[in-house]
Amino acid sequence: MQKTFQAMMLGLGCIGLALMAQESNVVLPQDKGPDKIDVSAYPADIQKDYKLFSSKCSKCHTIARPINTLMTRDGWERYVKRMMHKPNSGISDSQGKDIFTFLMYDQTNRKDKNPKAFFRALSDEEIEKLKAQK
């Protein structure tokens, strides 16, 4: 139960962190991480979803941000829906589903196997420090 709660809080924190950073032009630690994934071992349909994800999601923020962020299933679902509603995102309902499919596959098959390699949500104080550096 405690792990489930922690995972939910991590997901919610990442959503808030990502949204806050996008709106305030703060550079997150995730933004400085790798900006691509070798998906050659992923199923063909997931590789296709990765290409869509890369092209659509890089319009508003670094592609490194979602690549290097851990989130729960609910967190990714909320995040994708929110991004779909951003002005000029150009993400249709079917594209949003494909992006979500990629994010969940990647979360399950890459990130969940080594969560320590990815970034935790920052506290409000850490975000304020980043803003102050601008």
Image (tube, rainbow, N blue to C red):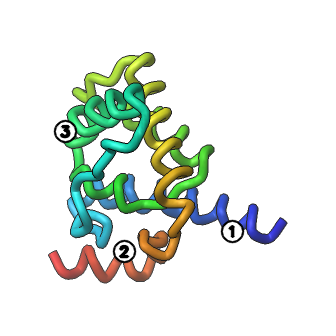
Asked if labels 3 and 2 touch by Cβ distance under 8 angstroms, the answer is: no
Relative image position of residue 100 (x, y in whole percent): 47, 35
Asked if labels 1 and 3 touch by Cβ distance under 8 angstroms, the answer is: no
Which label sits on residue 6?
Answer: 1
From this viewpoint, is residue 27 visible? Answer: no
Residue, disc 2: 127
- What is the secondary structure assignment of the residue under circle 2? helix
- Of 116 and 31, nearer the camera is 116
- What is the secondary structure assignment of the residue under circle 3? loop
Choose top left, top right, bottom left or bottom right for residue 17: bottom left
Relative to residue 72, is residue 25 drawn left or right? left
Disc nearer the start of the sequence (1/2): 1
Distance from the alpha carbon under mark 2 to that under mark 3 = 23 Å
Please report the residue visible at 33 percent of the width from the left and 44 percent of the height from the top.
39
- What is the secondary structure assignment of the residue under circle 1? helix
Disc nearer the start of the sequence (3/1): 1
Residue, disc 3: 59
Q: In this view, does 6 lie above or below 102?
A: below
Q: Is residue 86 above or below residue 113?
A: above
Relative to residue 9, is residue 48 drawn left or right? left
* Circle 2 residues within 10 Å: few <14, some 14–19, many ≥20: some
From this viewpoint, is residue 37 visible? Answer: yes
Please report the residue visible at 45 percent of the width from the left and 42 percent of the height from the top.
103
Relative image position of residue 55 (x, y in whole percent): 21, 34
Choose top left, top right, bottom left or bottom right for residue 28: bottom left
